[in-house]
Amino acid sequence: MVKETTLSSRAFDLLLIVVLVGIALLCVMPLWYTLAVSLSDNAAASSGRVSFWPVGFNFKSYQEIMGDGKFFNSFWISIQRVVLGSSLNFVIILLLGYPLSKSSKDLPYRNVFMWILVFTMLFNGGLIPWYQTVKSLGLINNIWALVLGNSVPVFSVILVINYFRNLPKELEEAALVDGAGPWYMLVKLFIPLSVPVLATVTLFSIVYHWNEFFNGLVLMSNADHYPLQTYIQQLVVIVDANTMTAEQIQKMSELSNQTLNAAKIFIAMLPVLVIYPFLQRFFIHGITLGSVKE
């Protein structure tokens, strides 16, 4: 392929670069602004004087969060939730996606199962029945209450189903001729060939379990069982002159809900920002080949 080097093509390339740089800046600017606010002092943040550089640079908001042992406890709970939840999602997605990728001839009532899955995407039993079900199972204040509620991510299952259906049928036929069974084909054939879509749905699971806070708020009656997002959502700066020493009042007056919330947001998004670059190269490929086509 010969690349054009005319003036118009160069101008278009320059325009494209400018547009892409502008989009990248638009994505980075909110993150940078959040960091700047979190590193600013109370007066500057409250008066709106912070733009893209910290005013009254300090780490007091981070010290306040990090100095609380409950923060690390909630951080550990979120790590457990992500590991357990993502692992369970991965297994269920595979065990649903592989058989449902077959035709109705190979899997009787396959369409019935698909309609059941799609129905759950459109309707749910409601908040109160959901809570009563979790309570009746004895899962209140239990890590499994945070994990089992989204153990079947239907959208991810559909992505995997369509990705499996796009794989060459000849590979499966050749494996059948060699005497391979369903489990062998799933582990040795389908999983190695489906790394892009599996990395994509794993990223979905990690982001969901890390960012979700409502379940922790409803299903955990004790703050000691809060995941990280629920914990930091509950943090507020309260100055009570009747119960605090002069030193504590001075320390808390240097903080504000605005700077503290900015620190919360920045800390909460760091793990995802660290993980995403390693899975990003699979993301577009997995979404494209696993898109819904039925």
Image: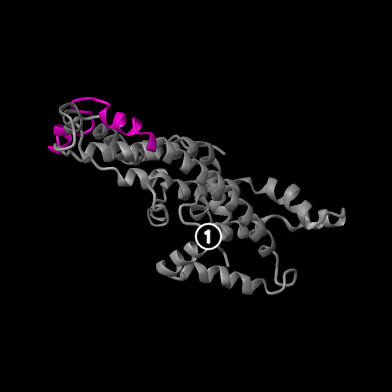
Q: Is residue 30 left or right of residue 153?
A: left
Quarter of the view holding residue 68: top left
Q: Quadrant of the C terminus?
A: bottom right
Identity of the residue furthest to the right in this view: 178
Q: Is residue 226 magenta?
A: no
Residue shown at 58% from the left, 59% from the top: 157
Q: Is residue 65 magenta?
A: yes
Residue shown at 52% from the left, 71% from the top: 119
Q: Position of residue 11 (x, y in %)?
A: 36, 37
For residue 232, above or below residue 5: below
Mark 1 Cα-neighbour bin, 10 Å: few <14, some 14–19, many ≥20: some
For residue 234, above or below residue 45: below
Residue shown at 39% from the left, 49% from the top: 222
Identity, as a three-letter code, of the amino acid under mark 1: Phe
Q: Is residue 115 left or right of residue 132?
A: right
Quarter of the view holding residue 254: top left
Count of residue discs: 1
Q: Is residue 276 visible?
A: yes
84, 44: nearer the viewer? 84
Residue shown at 51% from the left, 45% from the top: 82
Identity of the residue furthest to the front in this view: 243
Q: Quadrant of the N terminus?
A: top right
Residue marked by disc 1? 155
Read off the magenta span. 42-70
Q: Is residue 10 visible?
A: no
For residue 55, above or below residue 223: above
Q: Position of residue 191 (x, y in %)?
A: 68, 48
Colouring scheme, one of rainbow, by chain, secondary structure, one colour: one colour
Q: Position of residue 231 (x, y in %)?
A: 36, 44
3, 292: nearer the viewer? 292
